[in-house]
Image: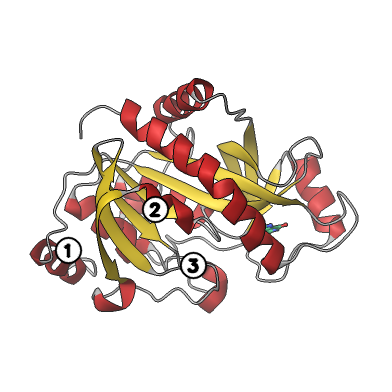
Amino acid sequence: MAPEDAAIAHLRAAGFSGPYALAIVTGTGLGALVEAVADRVSLDYAAIPGFPAPGVSGHGGRLHRGRLSGRPVLVFEGRTHAYETGNAAAMRVPLATAQGLGAARLLLTNAAGSLRPEIGPGRLVMLADHINLSGLNPLIGEPSDARFVPMTEAYDPGLRAHLSAAAEAIGLSLPTGVYAWFSGPSFETPAEVRMAGILGADLVGMSTVPETILARFLGMPVAAISVATNLAAGIAGGDPHHAETKAVAARAGADLARLAAGFVGRLPEP
Ligand code: HPA
């Protein structure tokens, strides 16, 4: 039995069978997206066998099914981060469960620090690519040859085109950027942020990359949106703070909800 089988059976019995046009993972402070989901049915992660319990304030730890723009969606409100336990594969069971229930694709969202002064707090950025600076990988220990996952075009070009079109339709500026994954939980030093910039990063953050790798391993197309909640350490004066991350993300949540709704409305039937 695969580790996600118990969760899939439990959720099917609870009325969570798909297909779903999209599965969404909400980042820190971004739970407001959930409010936009109509006809919602919700379950605590704690009630789902094999699901990890997110331990970060700003993360709900609930799974929702419902409709966004009339389309069936599955929303993971809150994620478990690699920095909570050192396990980069913490989201493997939830993502494999989404796929097992019939989610055709995945939208990851996160709060991130911006390296670009013109992309200030509250702005949304679409990920074009990432750099894994964590030294971790969720597929370490995976025995099958499927572990050798290609990561070219990890962020699906077709989904990115739909996101850009959805942003344009609502008059939202949506620049693209490269996201560098640091393990956290401490924020980066200014020297680390400078290094990430030299390497080609536009954003720094502590999530998303392991989930992108897992989704590509599972064969799910992925798109990802960062909310820049602050300028990264050393880019402007002051320290990043978790409280600021949550507060700015909550304000940007409305833009993210509108974008996600427009995006899912453009996707082909699952
Ligand atoms: N660094 C890493 N993760 C973050 C940041 C940051 O500056 N802001 C929000 N999440």
| Residue for badge 1 | 8
User: Which type of secondary structure does the marked residue at label 1 adopt?
Assistant: helix
- Sequence-wise, the earlier of marks 3 and 2 is 2
Mark 1 Cα-neighbour bin, 10 Å: few <14, some 14–19, many ≥20: many
Give the amino acid type for the residue marked by disc 2 in the picture. Answer: Glu
Per the rendering, the mark at residue 35 is 2
The quadrant where ligand 1 appears is bottom right
Instruction: Tell me residue 116's x, y (percent).
Output: 78, 39
Give the amino acid type for the residue marked by disc 1 in the picture. Answer: Ile
| Residue for badge 3 | 59
Per the rendering, the mark at residue 187 is none
User: Which type of secondary structure does the marked residue at label 3 adopt?
Assistant: loop
Q: Nearer the viewer, mark 3 or mark 2?
A: 2
Q: Residue at x 45, y 26 (%)?
A: 166
Q: Are marks 3 and 2 in contact (CB under 8 Å)?
A: no
Measure the alpha-carbon separation of dots 3 and 2. 14 Å
Q: Nearer the viewer, mark 1 or mark 3?
A: 3
Give left or right: position of 5 versus 149: left
